[in-house]
Image (spheres, coloured by chain):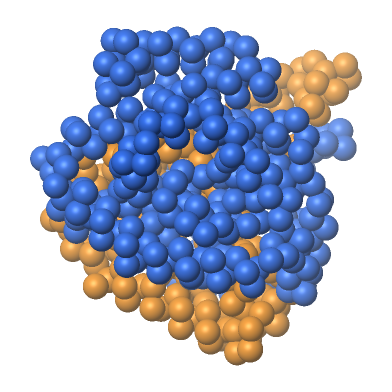
């Protein structure tokens, strides 16, 4: 049943979202929706100005990033690999569950501080079930009965309270954060019993966290063209998503680029030449679109049937 | 929402519009679920397909469901894009497409009970559609990942334009990366070289 580390890295996408990982610990930082409004025009210079706003200490951050990277390569990763090697999977799962359960206290506190009463009640139930029936949290019984784990921390609470994100920071050993993440991390550590149990416990916690992050770290390694930028962008977006609890109604931002309304790339004819091996659209898809008039709905209350887009008239092979 | 506003003026039209919206959404959803079933299929075939075999398999599926060129132009930015020669545009599009294909071929290579489940969909103010689904990973450290597929309508129907995993937008992340690289001296060639290196790593 146990996978070799090679196999593990092969299936890394499945342990992964494009989520970024701090080198040792799960993150302790956050971001609000970009309050700087991001007046994106399109020139690269403007992009650079934005980056300066989010990441004014890039020089320092890159140094820390490289430092953490070195620590990971020479210490954390080998030790974590050894840990993964000698520890049966069910033990690793138990260890993860145990620390997740202790974090549950924190989750409950932050639920209530964010005014999420019902979620707070559920998370309390989750903590009680796992601490008792789940044998001090070693077994995640609560998930089985429908009380899923929520991710709340004090940095998110601060964001909900309106504390601005502040600049992006890469902390030594702790990894990506923001200025708001620092008080967040301190509060969370103070509220977590694991902090007080003793150093060996914390070492196990860190090892286990590093081992769990292995897939993600490999994924970044493989997919990123610029690991520093990739890590920063994914981290900040991931934190934003946690703060807003990932509502689909907020997903309009996925289209939120200046090119949205700018179809003038001056190369429409290139489209088909380049993607010459493009397969045909399936027949039934065309047929089902065929009868509909395309109606544009937009916020300006304009509701006029567009000139009928009759897809059967459009040659699929070319747009000319 | 626009449909509600119109309701006062013309009930029938509203109904018709809502029907169209529903139908359009289901078409968008179909594009996503079809693509996901290709992913699951490829995983199930696993190592029986070679890396190259999976590349072929994914290339067809991606070109059929994604608007790769539109995504790429967003990543690069229209001003930068217009500054490229036709050869450069073609070269970058080829390399970028190959990179996306390789990434899928490399990562979706074995099956251990993963499944996609459709959750909900959302029509944006501008009439684009976001289809939300969850990837369940029973054997993974992370048991589930929420994928939001952002689709725009092209002349060929709904096409995936952007994908977010647990809120991390693929286009936004790539934009920052690519533009950083392009802003350096000889950025275009550097970008091509870096992507090619990534592709080679996947193919190893």
> What residue is shown at x 46% (from left), y 63% (from top)?
A68
Q: Is residue A190 left or right of residue B94?
A: right
User: Where does the image place residue B97, in percent across and percent down from the top left?
Assistant: 45, 68
**In front of the other: B134 or A96:** A96
> What residue is shown at x 31% (from left), y 18% (from top)?
A136
Quadrant in which the N terminus of chain B appears: top right
Q: Is residue A215 left or right of residue A229?
A: left
| Quarter of the view holding residue A98 | top left
> What residue is shown at x 25% (from left), y 30% (from top)?
A94
Q: Residue furthest bottom?
A: B186
Q: Is residue B13 above or below residue A84?
A: above
Q: Is residue B113 left or right of residue A236?
A: left
Q: Residue furthest left?
A: A1
Q: Which chain is blue?
A: A
- Is any atom of residue B67 visible in this view? no
User: Where does the image place residue A118, in percent across and percent down from the top left?
Assistant: 58, 11
- Is any atom of residue B89 visible in this view? yes
Q: Which chain is orange?
A: B
Total marks drawn?
Answer: 0
| Quarter of the view holding residue B130 | top right
Q: Is residue B2 above or below residue A176?
A: above
Q: Is residue B10 above or below residue B129?
A: above
Quadrant in which the C terminus of chain B appears: bottom left
User: Where does the image place residue A24, in percent across and percent down from the top left?
Assistant: 42, 51
Q: Is residue A126 above or below residue A269?
A: above
**In front of the other: A138 or A302:** A138
**In front of the other: A289 or A208:** A208
> What residue is shown at x 67% (from left), y 75% (from top)?
B81
User: Where does the image place residue A71, in percent across and percent down from the top left?
Assistant: 39, 64
Q: Is residue A280 left or right of residue A191?
A: left
């Amino acid at each position: 049943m146990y996978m070799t580390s090679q196999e593990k890295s092969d299936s890394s996408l499945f342990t992964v979202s494009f989520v970024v990982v701090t080198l040792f610990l799960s993150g302790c930082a956050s971001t609000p929706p970009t309050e700087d409004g991001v007046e994106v025009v399109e020139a690269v210079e403007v992009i650079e100005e934005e980056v300066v706003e989010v990441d004014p200490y890039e020089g320092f951050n890159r140094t820390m990033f490289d430092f953490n990277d070195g620590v990971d390569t020479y210490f954390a990763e080998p030790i974590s690999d050894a840990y993964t090697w000698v520890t049966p999977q069910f033990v690793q799962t138990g260890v993860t569950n145990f620390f997740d359960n202790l974090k549950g206290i924190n989750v409950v506190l932050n639920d209530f501080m964010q005014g999420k009463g019902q979620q707070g009640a559920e998370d309390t139930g989750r903590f009680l079930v796992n601490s008792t029936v789940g044998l001090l949290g070693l077994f995640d019984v609560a998930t089985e009965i429908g009380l899923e784990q929520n991710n709340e921390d004090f940095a998110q609470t601060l964001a909900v309270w309106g504390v601005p994100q502040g600049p992006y920071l890469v902390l030594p050993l702790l990894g990506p954060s923001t200025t708001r993440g620092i008080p967040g991390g301190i509060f969370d550590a103070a509220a977590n019993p694991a902090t007080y149990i003793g150093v060996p416990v914390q070492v196990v916690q860190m090892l286990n966290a590093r081992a769990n992050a292995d897939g993600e770290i490999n994924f970044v390694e493989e997919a990123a063209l610029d690991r520093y930028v990739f890590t920063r962008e994914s981290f900040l977006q991931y934190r934003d998503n946690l703060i807003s609890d990932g509502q689909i109604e907020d997903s309009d931002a996925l289209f939120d680029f200046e090119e949205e309304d700018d179809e003038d790339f001056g190369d429409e004819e290139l489209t088909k030449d380049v993607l010459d091996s493009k397969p045909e659209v399936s027949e039934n898809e065309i047929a089902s679109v065929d009868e509909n008039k395309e109606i544009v709905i937009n916020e300006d209350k304009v509701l006029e049937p567009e000139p009928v887009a009759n897809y059967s008239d459009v040659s699929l092979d070319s747009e000319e | 929402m626009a449909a509600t506003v119109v309701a006062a003026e013309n009930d029938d039209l509203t109904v018709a519009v809502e029907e169209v919206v529903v139908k359009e959404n289901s078409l968008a959803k179909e594009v996503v679920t079809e693509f996901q079933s290709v992913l699951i299929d490829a995983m199930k075939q696993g190592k029986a397909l070679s890396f190259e075999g999976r590349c072929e398999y994914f290339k067809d599926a991606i070109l059929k469901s994604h608007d790769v060129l539109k995504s790429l132009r967003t990543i690069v930015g229209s001003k930068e894009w217009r500054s490229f020669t036709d050869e450069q545009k073609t070269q970058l599009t080829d390399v970028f497409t190959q990179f996306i294909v390789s990434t899928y071929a490399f990562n979706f290579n074995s099956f251990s009970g993963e499944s996609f489940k459709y959750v909900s969909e959302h029509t944006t103010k501008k009439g684009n559609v976001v289809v939300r689904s969850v990837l369940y990973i029973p054997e993974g450290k992370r048991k589930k990942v929420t994928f939001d597929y952002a689709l725009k309508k092209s002349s060929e129907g709904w096409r995936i334009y952007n994908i977010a995993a647990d809120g991390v937008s693929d286009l936004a992340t790539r934009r920052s990366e690519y533009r950083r690289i392009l802003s350096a001296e000889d950025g275009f060639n550097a970008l091509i070289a870096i992507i090619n290196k990534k592709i080679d790593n996947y193919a190893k």
